[in-house]
Amino acid sequence: MDKDGNQLLSLFVYHEINYTAMKTILITGGSGLIGRKLSRLLVEKGYKVIWLSRERYVKADIPRYRWDYRRNEIEKEAVELADIIVHLAGSNIGEDSWTRQKKQDIVESRVQTAQLLLDTIKSMDKRPEAFISASAIGYYGLKITNNLYSEEDPSTENDFLSRTCRKWENAALRFQEELNIRTVVLRTGFVISKNSDAFRKMVLPTRFGLGAPIGSGRQYLTWIHIDDLCRMYLKAIEDTDMKGVYNAVSPEFISNADFMHTLAKVMKRPFFMPHVPSFLMRLILGEASGMVLGGSRISSRKIQDAGYEFQYDTSEKAMKASLKAIKERENKKRKRN
């Protein structure tokens, strides 16, 4: 390439890097499992990241602006700064019993927060380029079936999670319908990560040779590694052709029994314990037990057709990576002590 060509290429690369650096991504729920990991990835890619949080701290490494959806309060400056909004806010579904108050919090922390953002944007002259929202595969229901669900399948179940996901997604899709803002919804499966409480609860008994299938073990456990999930969010940010709903799940179909057996194999532990009875899970978890006792196959074809390539396409690969990270963290703690 000649001198002029090199200069042109350098100018193009410089322009692209600075274009990315100028983009500000506003994340709600930034302090959660996905939010923290995604924030680090975006910063590494050159984006400026800001959070909406319960407390204001704009001098933090990731500036935090205050909002309180219960009081309908929000620092408008944060929304005005945002080129793209990633909506991850929501009360932890797997935390605490599903009392009437907890269920109300689960819904309102997702739906009312989206409504507050929508109302705020309507009051502004500036519009963000995209609104990207989390959702969950609970949309398809908690029954054990042989169905293979895709994004085109309607949500017909009447359990709490299905109803919640419908409200969650309807709130997100209003950004497209009412403001013509490109909107992407990612229906997420079980997240495998070194920092996932749910995954660690599987690892602990398995470490002592006590890992076992839950309920019948026939229910499908639809999962995704956190690195793949965050890279999907990155793709949704950068790929302007992405619009609508996508299943954020791995391409592997695996039952709960096979998942637990694979975990024991990866950890080199025996796997002979009897199934954890369904009635016991219902006794302990109540209505929330449906999350672990049910599950069908969910297709990842749409996100793959959009050009996404999985880093972790089998649960064995995902487990090995996360277990290695857990071990490295434990070794660091021992050295410090």
Image (spheres, helix red, strand yellow):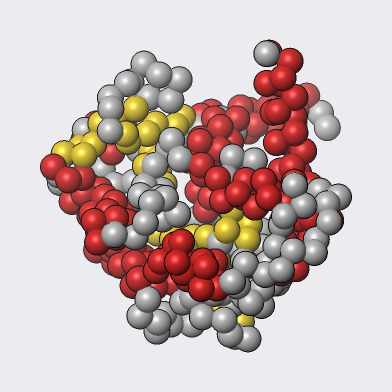
Q: Is residue 158 left or right of residue 334?
A: left
Q: Which part of the image, by quadrant, shows the C terminus?
A: top right
Vertical position of residue 251 compared to residue 109: above or below? below
Q: State which quarter of the image contains the N terminus.
A: top right
Q: Residue at x 67, y 63 (%)?
A: 250
Q: Position of residue 184 (x, y in %)?
A: 44, 59
Residue 289 x, y percent position in the rendering: 47, 67
> Residue drawn 42% across and 50% down?
95
Q: Locate residue 170, reporting x and y percent.
A: 31, 67
Q: Quadrant of residue 162?
A: bottom left
Up the image or down, 305 lies above or below 133; here it is below
User: Is 171 situated left or right of 73 in this image?
Assistant: right
Which residue sits at x=71%, y=43%? 322
In the image as oriented, which residue stretches furthest toward the top? 336
Identify whether 39 is placed above or below 228: above
- 129 or 167: nearer the viewer: 167
Residue drawn at 58 percent across, 85 percent down: 145
Residue 316 visible from this viewpoint: no
The answer to which quarter of the image holds residue 9 is top right
Number of dots carrying numbers: 0
**Residue closer to the observer: 230 or 107:** 107
Q: Where is residue 259 drawn, in percent x and y?
A: 72, 63
Is residue 255 visible in the rendered image? The answer is yes
